C-alpha cells in the first residue's frame, strides 16, 4: 500500500482579504471488495469509485475579500484526483458569493457546513446530509439567524431559497431541484435555545424517457414550489402533487449544562400530504449530544441517534379527499415513479446515508433506493489523548427491511464502525491521521480497511 505526501503553494491574499488552502493525500486498502462504509460516506461525494484500494489526492482553498464595509465576496474550490483501477478527476466544489450584513447570495456547487462535530450519521437531518457531492445551484439566504422585528431579544429566524440543476446521468435528464427552508429560533437569558423549521425540496422539469419534456413554464413553476397538484399538462401521477416533493420538519433544543452544552434534535420526513400531516408520526431521526466547553479534554463530546422509518404512513394506498385526489400511505421515502433516480446525486444519497443500497439500472444509472425502511442506532464520540493527538469513533447498527414494494425477507442487519487517531499540533500546519473501519452484516457484507491521510494547511 503506497503512501505519498504532496504539498502545494498558494498565492497570498489581497489586501484586507483572507485565504486558506490545503492539500492532502490519502491511501486506503481493504478486504471485502470496497472500502468500509464510513470511509466513503458523509464525504461530500469524494469517493466516486469502487475498489479494495483507493488513492485520493485533493486540494482546495477558501477566501473572502471586502467589497465595502457592509459586504464581502466569498469564494472557494475543492478538487481531487483518485485512483482505484482508473484515474478519475473531480471538481467537488466551486462557488462565488457576496455576503452582506443580513443576506447572502451564492452561486456554484457548494457544501453545507458540517454540524455536531462530524459525529452525526447524517449531519443532524434525515434529509439534508453531507453525503453526496454538492450540485450546482444559486442560493439566496439570510446571513445565519437574524433578529425578528420587535422581538430582537428572544426571537430570530433564518431562511434559504435555492434553484439547482442535476447534470449527471439520470432516468429523467437534467431535472431542476428547488429547495427552500425556514427556521425560527427562540432564546432566553439562561442560554436555552429552541430552533424549529422545515426543509422543502422539489424535483421539477427535465426530460423523461416516458413523458418527454416535463412541464417547466413559469405557471408550472408556481405549482411545483407551492406543492399544488399538477394540471392536464403533467403526468397522471401528479394528480396528488406536482413533481417529486419531499422534505422534513425539524427541531433542535440546545441547553447549557455544567461543563458543556446538551443538544436534542428530531427530524421528521415527509413525501406528500400524509407525511406533512403526520400520518407517519413514528418515522423520525432522533438525536442527543453533549459537548464539553473544553475542546482539548480526553472526552470532548458524543452523539447518540435513533432512526426509524418503517411506517411510511401505512403499507397500502388510501385515496381520500372530496375529489378522491389525495393518496395516502406507501410514502416510499426518497423514491419516485417519474423522477426514478430518487433523492440521489452522482451515486450517493442526498439524505441520510443509512438509506442504502441504491438500485442501479441496466444503463448503470441510479434508479432510487432498494432500502428505505430502516431501524438504526448510531453512536459518535471524539476527544483528545493529549494536546494535538485526537481520537474519533463512529459505531452504527442497522436493521433493514427494504421497501414496501420489495421487502427484504428476512430483514438484513448491518454493523458499521470507524475509528480515527489524528495528530494535529497547533503549532504545525500538518495533520496526519490513521483510520480503521470494520463492517459486518448481510446488507453490504463484511469489510475491513485502513486509511492513512496527510494534509498540509496553508493560511494567509
Image (cartoon, rainbow, N blue to C red):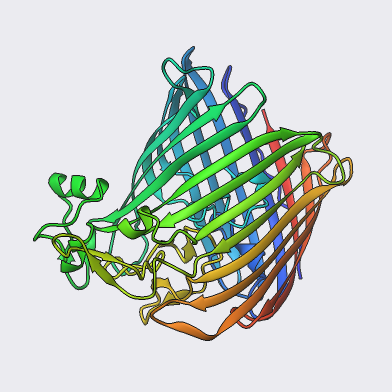
Question: Residue 228, position in %: x, y?
Answer: 21, 51
What residue do we see at 69% from left, 47% from top?
Answer: 289
**Residue 61 shows up from this direction:** yes
- Against 66, residue 277 (above or below) is below
- Against 180, residue 18 (above or below) is above
Toward the right, the furthest residue is: 386
Question: Residue 265, position in %: x, y?
Answer: 58, 47
What residue do we see at 88% from left, 40% from top?
Answer: 387
In-image side of 402 versus 272 (left or right): right
Question: Residue 373, position in %: x, y?
Answer: 49, 71
Where, by quadrant of the figure, is residue 180 drawn?
A: top left
- Against 192, residue 304 (above or below) is below
- Against 211, residue 446 (above or below) is below
Question: Residue 143, position in %: x, y?
Answer: 47, 27
Q: Nearer the viewer, residue 97 or 239?
A: 239
Toward the top, the furthest residue is: 69
Q: Nearer the viewer, residue 432 or 148?
A: 148
Q: Nearer the viewer, residue 2 or 397?
A: 397
Q: Nearer the viewer, residue 172 or 263?
A: 263
Amino acid at each position: 500500500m503506497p503512501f505519498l505526501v504532496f504539498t502545494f503553494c498558494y498565492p497570498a491574499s489581497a489586501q484586507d482579504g483572507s485565504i486558506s488552502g490545503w492539500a492532502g493525500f490519502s491511501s486506503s486498502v481493504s478486504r471485502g471488495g470496497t472500502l468500509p462504509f464510513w470511509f466513503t460516506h458523509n464525504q461530500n461525494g469524494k469517493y466516486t469509485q469502487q475498489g479494495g484500494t483507493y488513492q485520493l489526492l485533493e486540494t482546495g482553498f477558501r477566501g473572502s475579500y471586502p467589497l465595502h464595509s457592509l459586504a464581502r465576496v466569498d469564494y472557494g474550490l475543492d478538487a481531487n484526483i483518485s485512483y482505484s483501477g482508473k484515474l478519475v478527476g473531480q471538481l467537488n466544489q466551486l462557488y462565488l458569493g457576496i455576503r452582506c450584513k443580513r443576506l447572502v447570495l451564492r452561486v456554484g456547487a457548494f457544501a453545507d457546513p458540517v454540524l455536531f462535530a462530524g459525529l452525526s450519521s447524517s449531519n443532524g437531518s434525515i434529509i439534508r446530509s453531507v453525503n453526496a457531492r454538492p450540485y450546482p445551484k444559486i442560493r439566496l439566504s439570510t446571513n445565519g439567524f437574524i433578529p425578528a422585528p420587535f422581538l430582537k431579544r428572544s426571537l430570530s429566524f433564518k431562511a434559504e431559497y435555492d434553484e439547482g440543476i442535476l447534470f449527471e446521468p439520470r432516468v429523467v435528464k437534467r431535472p431542476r431541484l428547488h429547495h427552500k427552508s425556514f427556521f425560527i429560533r427562540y432564546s432566553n437569558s439562561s442560554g436555552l435555545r429552541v430552533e424549529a423549521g422545515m426543509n422543502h425540496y422539489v424535483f421539477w422539469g427535465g426530460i423523461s424517457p416516458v413523458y418527454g419534456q416535463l412541464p417547466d413554464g413559469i405557471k408550472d413553476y408556481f405549482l411545483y414550489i407551492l406543492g399544488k397538484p399538477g394540471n392536464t399538462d403533467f403526468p397522471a401521477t401528479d394528480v396528488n402533487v406536482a413533481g417529486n416533493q419531499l422534505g422534513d420538519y425539524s427541531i433542535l433544543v440546545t441547553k447549557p449544562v455544567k461543563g458543556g452544552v446538551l443538544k436534542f434534535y428530531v427530524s421528521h420526513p415527509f413525501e406528500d400530504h400524509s407525511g406533512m400531516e403526520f400520518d407517519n408520526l413514528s418515522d423520525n431521526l432522533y438525536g442527543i449530544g453533549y459537548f464539553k466547553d473544553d475542546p482539548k479534554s480526553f472526552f470532548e463530546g458524543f452523539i447518540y441517534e435513533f432512526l426509524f422509518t418503517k411506517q411510511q404512513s401505512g403499507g397500502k394506498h388510501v385515496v381520500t379527499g372530496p375529489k378522491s385526489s389525495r393518496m395516502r400511505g406507501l410514502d416510499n421515502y426518497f423514491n419516485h415513479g417519474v423522477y426514478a433516480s430518487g433523492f440521489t446525486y452522482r451515486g450517493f444519497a442526498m439524505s441520510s446515508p443509512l438509506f442504502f443500497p441504491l438500485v442501479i439500472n441496466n444503463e448503470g444509472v441510479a434508479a432510487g433506493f432498494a432500502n428505505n425502511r430502516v431501524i438504526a442506532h448510531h453512536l459518535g464520540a471524539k476527544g483528545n489523548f493529549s494536546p494535538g493527538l485526537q481520537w474519533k469513533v463512529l459505531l452504527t447498527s442497522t436493521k433493514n427491511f427494504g421497501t414496501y414494494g420489495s421487502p427484504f425477507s428476512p430483514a438484513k442487519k448491518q454493523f458499521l464502525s470507524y475509528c480515527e487517531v489524528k495528530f494535529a499540533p497547533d503549532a504545525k500546519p500538518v495533520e496526519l491521521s490513521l483510520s480503521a473501519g470494520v463492517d459486518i452484516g448481510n446488507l453490504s457484507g463484511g469489510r475491513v480497511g485502513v486509511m492513512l491521510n496527510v494534509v498540509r494547511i496553508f493560511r494567509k
